[in-house]
Amino acid sequence: KNEVEQSPQNLTAQEGEFITINCSYSVGISALHWLQQHPGGGIVSLFMLSSGKKKHGRLIATINIQEKHSSLHITASHPRDSAVYICAVRGYGGSQGNLIFGKGTKLSVKP
Amino acid sequence: NAGVTQTPKFQVLKTGQSMTLQCAQDMNHNSMYWYRQDPGMGLRLIYYSASEGTTDKGEVPNGYNVSRLNKREFSLRLESAAPSQTSVYFCASTFTETQYFGPGTRLLVL
């Protein structure tokens, strides 16, 4: 069983829809990251969470430590949001980049 | 600032050949990392360097060596390439938990 599971694997939405991507993990963590991988391959960091909720523009990330679950929400989705969204966790005592990555959720937003 | 740069962008090797993937960052970060990304799998850590002069193995270090030449540069060497090392390789650096990734090197081993 993978230590970090994302769902769904693939997601197609219409422009303007509210999108939710889920991440569940099975290990104790000190931090959870959401990353975005563009169609060209570049990867950017979106959020780092250790508790609660963070918001940046149309993106909202939440984490429930007790349930070992995080969600990434995109409001008013746009075709430029089309990308692979990756969840990654850092276990206790691990270095900042020693992350366990999910396989990613491929999002396609149609105009 | 260029951020994290990687060279080459693309490389084709024959089995048994050697090569070095170069990575540099101009953000004065202490920690640097090498990951590989394969289809259907998440990114996996190959090696990391918490600071200049130190390196540690990650999840999949076999077949690779690294050098932290100075604070800016962290290279990954394949001494004898194998088809199983066909992958996309990403270098990254971190600062206060934020990851900064390079553009990736696509490697094909025939």
Image (tube, coloured by chain):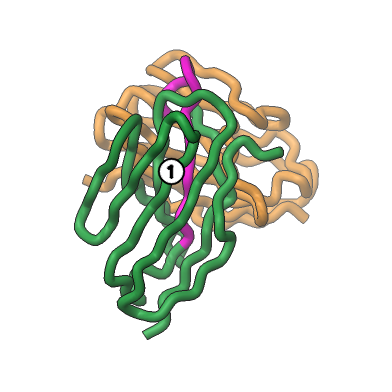
Chain colours: A green, B orange
Apparent side of residue A22 relative to residue B107 in the rendered image (left or right): left
Residue B23, placed above or below residue A20: above
Identified at 27% across, 47% down, the residue is B2
Please say if B39 is above or below B102: below
Viewport quadrant of the N terminus of chain B: top left
Residue A73 x/y as whole percent = 35, 57
At horizontal 36% and vertical 50% (from top left) the residue drawn is A44
Q: State whether residue A45 is above or below residue B10.
A: above
Q: Nearer the viewer, residue B1 or A96?
A: A96
Q: Position of residue A102 (x, y in %)?
A: 56, 45
Pointer 1 residue: A70
Q: Main secondary structure of the magenta part?
A: strand
Instruction: Please tell me how many numbered marks the rendered image carries.
Output: 1
The amino acid sitting under disc 1 is Ser
Name the residue rendered at 38%, 17% in the picture: B51
Q: Does dot 1 land on a helix, a strand or a loop?
A: strand
Let me know if residue B26 is in the magenta part.
no
